[in-house]
Amino acid sequence: AFFAAVTALKHCRQHSVSVPLHAQHVEVCGKSDKCWLALGQFTLVRAVELSSPSLLFGGLSGLAVRPGLGLLAISDVGWLIEFSLTAIQCGNGLVKCGNESATIRLLLDTVGLPIGAGPLVSGGHTLSDPEALTISTDGTTGLVGFESQQRIWEYSGGATGPFNGAASEVIGPSHLTACPRDNLGVESLIY
C-alpha cells in the first residue's frame, strides 16, 4: 500500500494530495514535579501530537511557519507537508483539538523533478534525506538542508512562495560536503 501511494503521488499531475490530520494536546509533565518547561529564555507553551492514517504522513524532520499561511514541514523522504496553524493551536483552552487536513506534495530537485521517496545513489544513500527547513521572513525563499548527500538547496518562488519550482544549489562551507554520511549533516537552518 505504501509503495502504491508513493507511486500515485509521484505520477499525479499536481504532485500533491490531501490527507486527514489529527491534532491532540499532549500533557508534557503530567503530575511530575521534576519537569523542565524552560531552557534559558525559551519556555514550552504547549505540545501537540500530529497523526494521520495516511502512510504518506510522518517522519517530519523540519518545520517552518509560513506567515498567514500556516505551517510547512518536510519529511525525511522529501515530501512537503502543509497544514493550518489551527491544527496545532490546541491545548490550554485555545482551540479544541481535532481533525484537520494536510496537503502533501513533492519536493523538487535542481532540474524540477520530484525527489520524494527518492532514488538511491552510490553507497545506498538517498538524495531525499532532508533534515532542515527554513523560510525567509518575507515568505518568498526557502532553504532545505540534506544529510547523506550533504548539501543545501534554495527555493525561490516570489509571490507564490518557495518550493513551487526547481531548487538551486547553495555553496556552503567547504567542510559540508566532506561530512561523513552517517546522520551527521545539516540538522537546522535559519534565515
Image (cartoon, helix red, strand yellow):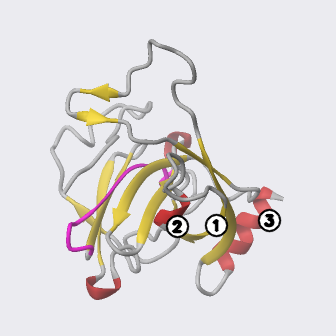
Q: Which residue is mark 1?
A: 100
Residue 3: image x %, image y %?
A: 77, 59
Q: Which residue is painted at 72% across and 69% down in the image?
A: 7
Tell me if residue 115 comes above or below residue 113 in the rendering. Answer: above
**28 vs 105, nearest the viewer:** 28
Which residue, as the protein is rendered here, is positioned at the far top?
A: 34
Q: Which residue is mark 2?
A: 83
Q: Mark number for residue 4?
A: 3
Q: Nearer the viewer, mark 1 or mark 2?
A: 1
Label 3 is placed on what type of residue?
Answer: Ala
Closer to the chain start, of discs 3 and 2, is 3
Which residue, as the protein is rendered here, is positioned at the far front?
A: 93
Left or right of 168? Residue 123 is: right
Q: Any magenta on residue 138?
A: yes
Please state, as top left, top right, bottom left or bottom right, where the C terminus lies in the image.
bottom left
Name the quadrant containing residue 116. Answer: bottom right
Label 1 is placed on what type of residue?
Answer: Glu
**48 vs 106, nearest the viewer:** 48
Q: Which residue is painted at 44% across and 12% down in the image?
A: 34
Q: Which residue is painted at 40% across and 43% down in the image?
A: 147
**142 vs 168, nearest the viewer:** 142
Closer to the chain start, of discs 1 and 3, is 3
> What distance separates the C-alpha of mark 3 from that of mark 2?
23 Å
Q: Any magenta on residue 113?
A: no
- The 10 Å Cα crowd at callout 1, few under 14, some 14 to 19, many 20 or more, is some
- The 10 Å Cα crowd at callout 3, few under 14, some 14 to 19, many 20 or more, is few
Secondary structure category for the residue under label 3:
helix
Q: Which residue is painted at 48% across and 67% down in the image?
A: 107
Left or right of 55? Residue 62 is: left
Task: Read off the magenta span.
Answer: 126-139
Secondary structure category for the residue under label 2:
strand
> What distance separates the C-alpha of mark 1 from that of mark 3?
24 Å
